[in-house]
Image: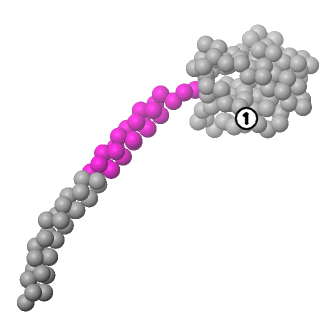
Amino acid sequence: MESVAYSGKGRRALNPAHKRRVAIITALIYAAIIAACFLIARWVIGGLGERAVALVHDGDGAVHELPLDEDAELRVETSLGVNVIVVEDCAVRMAEADCPHGDCLRQHAISQPGEQIICLPHELWIEIAGDDADAGEMDTDAVVYDDDVDTVAR
Ligand SMILES: [Zn+2]
């Protein structure tokens, strides 16, 4: 008798607790969904305003990242030579180089994805990160010079 009364009590006591647990789990699931939506929205909005970044590939195979919205100066010294790369006004340019012909110093400052600055003697090149097919490859055709004279050896 006693045990039956206990189990009956126990079941009655369990029901509200069980409901509460279901309510808490439901609330947690809703919270998780809302948090996920919030994160996805932030990710999408953040993706639209992604910062342009210049990637400097040096002769030793290292890659240096330079955000274009931050003025900066990067000195790259490898076994092949020294290059000084400057970020200014949301564009990147070669400021100094001790390569023999200084071709890289004559190249335009770059700011658009796909554009590159190449210092062939130092095997160093700068690209603006983008999703075009040539990204990550040295592309001499992407180089634009400040003047019309083309001194690149053919
Ligand atoms: Zn050079």
Q: Is residue 135 left or right of residue 150?
A: left
Name the outermost residue toward the front. 2
Inspect this view and state whether residue 142 appears: no
Q: Nearer the viewer, residue 101 or 45?
A: 45
* Drawn side of residue 57 relative to residue 11, left or right: right
Residue at 60% of width from left, 32% of height from top? 130
The region drawn magenta spans: 30-52
Which quadrant is home to the C terminus? top right
Binning the other alpha carbons within 10 Å of mark 1 as few (below 14), some (14 to 19) or many (20 upward) gives: some
Secondary structure of the magenta portion, mostly? helix
**Residue that label 1 marks:** 63
Q: Position of residue 55 (x, y in %)?
A: 68, 30
SS for dot 1: strand
Residue shown at the point (81%, 15%) measured from the top left? 96
Along the horizontal axis of the image, is 78 left or right of 71? right
Query: Does the magenta-highlighted stretch encompass residue 114?
Result: no
Amino acid under disc 1: Val
Q: Quadrant of residue 83?
A: top right
Q: Please determine whether, in this image, residue 143 is positioned above or below residue 139.
A: above
Determine whether 90 is above or below 30 in the image: above
